[in-house]
Image (spheres, rainbow, N blue to C red):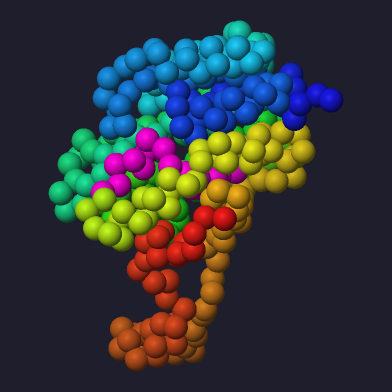
Amino acid sequence: MAGWMQDKVVVVTGAGGGIGRDIALAMAAEGASVVVNDIGASLSGVGLDQGPAQRVVSEIEALGGKAIANTDSVATWATAQQIVASAVDTYGRIDCVVNNAGILRDRFFFNMSIEEWQTVIDVHLQGSFFMARAAAPHFKSENRGALVNMTSTSALVGNFGQANYMAAKLGIVGLSRSVALDMAKFNVRSNCIAPFAWSRMISSIPTDTPDQVERVNRLKTMETAKIAPLAVYLASDQAKDVTAQIFGVRANEIFLFSQPRPIRSVHNAEGWTPEKIANQAMPAMRAQFTPLERSQDVFTWDPL
């Protein structure tokens, strides 16, 4: 039986380790030819190393799969085009981009530098746009294609010290939906995954208190490989009618996230004044306010 991705070509960014590596391995195991993209930088985006991408390619080839390494950055338009070109030049086509590349520059908002803000936006949000935009002409001309974009519950719910990351990851949700709308008539799909997994991206979480230690121990039970099956499904032809959705994966759980829609309205025939808003509108809506929570406040049960 042919694999779910037989004869397809997939670019996986940030695939030198963690979630990206497992997605690349899973895509190859299901028959895809994979462009393993990773610049080999540190968690904060510093440095370059060709080793991680090539090691994953060697793993895929050792298992009988097909892959090439690419070490271009997603964070500029020119280099993102080179990543997509490497797929088309080598394999003659491109069927899916998994926008997984990311870095962290965590700091409380009131201390965050402009550089810490900009570098995270460049890799996550700009990079996801550049990769999607570079692939779009190929998808459009072939009347097919899929984007799998990585968001985060840090953005969907909240977290401390991640204004840059949260803004980028929520921006990716809007980008993904826009691509789904604009490209639907060309049979191109775009979805998001919010992954829960212990990887280098979250290994910097502090462990200064018993609660933090307990949280980290719980996170360590969530394997990066658990994310890959959903990514493969979303990239496959079996998901041809699934687009503009936000999913989450947490060990053996898969979530479908809600998206913003009106949940309460108030009306005043004479029009609103600040006083009327304070005395009537806010009290009427307050029960439906979204709490100021973090991801861990919402996902309070152990991974299943």
Could you say which is closer to the camera, residue 254 or residue 101? 254
The percent coordinates of residue 152 (x first, y second) are: 45, 48
Q: Residue at x 41, y 82 (%)?
A: 286
Counting labels gives 0
The percent coordinates of residue 237 (x first, y second) are: 76, 34
Horizontal side of 116 relative to 136 (left or right) equals: left
Q: Is residue 179 visible?
A: no
Residue 188, located in which quarter of the rendered image? top right
Q: Is residue 289 visible?
A: yes
Could you say which is closer to the camera, residue 185 or residue 87? 87
The percent coordinates of residue 231 (x first, y second) are: 61, 37
* Residue located farthest toward the top when viewing the structure as drawn: 90
Horizontal side of 293 relative to 46 (left or right) equals: right
> Is residue 197 one of those drawn in magenta?
yes
Pick the quarter of the image with the C terminus: bottom right
Q: Residue at x 43, y 49 (%)?
A: 219
Q: Residue at x 55, y 48 (%)?
A: 251
* Residue located farthest toward the right when viewing the structure as drawn: 1
> Is residue 134 one of those drawn in magenta?
no
> Does residue 118 sit above or below 137 in this rendering?
below
Could you say which is closer to the camera, residue 59 or residue 136? 59
Region of the chain picked out in magenta, as a range: 191-206
Horizontal side of 209 relative to 238 (left or right) equals: left
> Does residue 206 sit above or below 260 in this rendering?
above
Q: Residue at x 75, y 30 (%)?
A: 4
The percent coordinates of residue 167 (x first, y second) are: 36, 48
Pick the quarter of the image with the N terminus: top right
* Residue located farthest toward the left when viewing the structure as drawn: 111
> Does residue 234 sit above or below 30 in this rendering?
below
